[in-house]
Image (cartoon, helix red, strand yellow):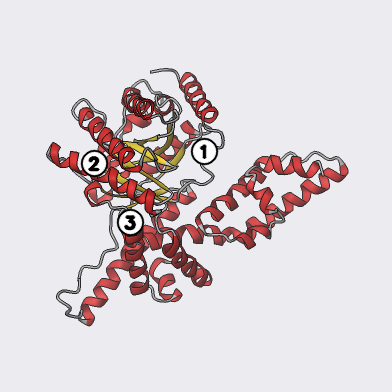
Amino acid sequence: MPEPSTSLSQAANAYSSWARMHPGDPPTRQPVHTVYGGADLFRADTARRLGDLALRSLETYAPDPGTLASAIGLDPGLAETVRARVKAKLETEPVEDFRIDFEDGFGNRPDDEEDAAARQAGREVARGIADGTLPPFIGIRVKPFSAELAARAARTLDLFLSSLLEASGGRLPEWLFVTDPKVVVPEQVAVLADLLDGVESRSGLAPGTIRLEIMVETPASILGPDGNCPLPALVAAGRGRCAAAHFGVYDYTASLGITAFHQDLDHPACDFARHVMQVALSGLGVWLSDGATNVMPAPPHRVADGAPLTAEQAARNRDAVHRGWALHFRHVRHSLRHGYYQGWDLHPAQLPTRYAAVYAFYLEALDAATDRLSRFVDRAARATLTGDVFDDAATGQALLNFFLRGLACGAITDAEAAATGLTRDEIATRSFPAILRSRRNR
């Protein structure tokens, strides 16, 4: 295993190579979630169908702002705004990122079944490109590149991509990812990078078009036997393709011997792993994503043959959904407080609370952030006039990032961002130092 400094250097060089190949990358937004679903169930309109189910859940179990606030512990003063923006999001862009799953969500099936599912998924993505129904980010999760499953993972990837390219006439979604699960050693990532090199070369695609992401699901991915953190080396093995690292809560905690009753996203052992990921991958251009809440907000009673639910059954449904919502809301807020702005969602009824938690996170701090950023802008203008040095650009950038993320996901409106004193063009630079330079040159 390379020394940490060597690994960091390799990963940084890989990211710099990626940036040279793709001017303008990384994307101007990071999705707030990744929704996973079994590959055999994926269709071109899956995102819209999930959105419709999410809207139905919202209207059924939180028909008004007060009910939503009491169900999840939301500040009642924000409830009306949050619910309205969540509803608008579910109507227009219910899913930001979707992963077509050939691993846990698909299971181990006969080869002919997985072959058929891979081909079908490729054709459905192609249809989604043509119909304009795909979420902004999409990809597949293959099986691990372990000794036992590497051949199966490679075949699924090849069948999916070849079917997609054939059906689409060589077109790919703008942001296409391949998720590499249960990564432990750099060779697993390197194999996937080699496969993607081959696909791009054969298909005439620009090098680095298809991104990969790693899943951190074992203690060995956090701390190696030599005491070093393997994460920078894992990223470097992607040779500039590694765009994200996703934390797998349940595999990780199970590997530590934590019992099922205590396997939870906000377990202290998970916080340790998340913090190591943050420190080890800081500055490498790699998105961080948290894990999932595996308690679903699903009603136990369903309408059968048109027969209405009894009052008792309806109450049990409401209580079950509200409990699931409250837990998911708490977990998302925990992730956000720890600087993890993306996480997994597994059920359509989790979409309302995903967006409710994200929107509340930004709206709770909006007034203070607006005041602070406007003061920074004002100080920058006065520094220009007086010749003083304005040297706290790092804090200004952190505040600007707050607004950029909030705008991208729909939590903050353009009008609210404009209250900072920044113009739309200035915000679009995504760089507080660039804003300072521009104002000094006026």
Q: Nearer the viewer, residue 396 or 404?
A: 404
**Disc on the earlier residue, 3 or 1:** 1
Q: Picture coordinates of residue 112 (x, y %)?
A: 13, 39
What amino acid does circle 1 point to?
Answer: Pro
Would you say residue 75 is visible in this rendering?
A: no
Could you tell me residue 399's position as x and y percent? 63, 49
Residue 211 as seen in the image, left or right of residue 282: left
* Image quadrant where one finds the N terminus: top left
- Find disc 2 in the rendering and name its residue: 119
Q: CA distance from mark 3 to mark 2?
A: 17 Å
The label number, if any, that marks residue 26 in the structure image: 1
Q: State which tag comes first along the sequence, 2 or 1.
A: 1
Q: Secondary structure at mark 3?
A: loop
Residue at the far right in the pictured view: 386
Front position among marks 3 and 1 = 3
In the rendering, at what x and y percent does residue 194 appear?
Answer: 35, 24
The quarter of the image holding the C terminus is: top right
User: CA gap, disc 2 to disc 1?
Assistant: 29 Å
Q: Amino acid at mark 2?
A: Arg
Q: Which residue is mark 3?
A: 45
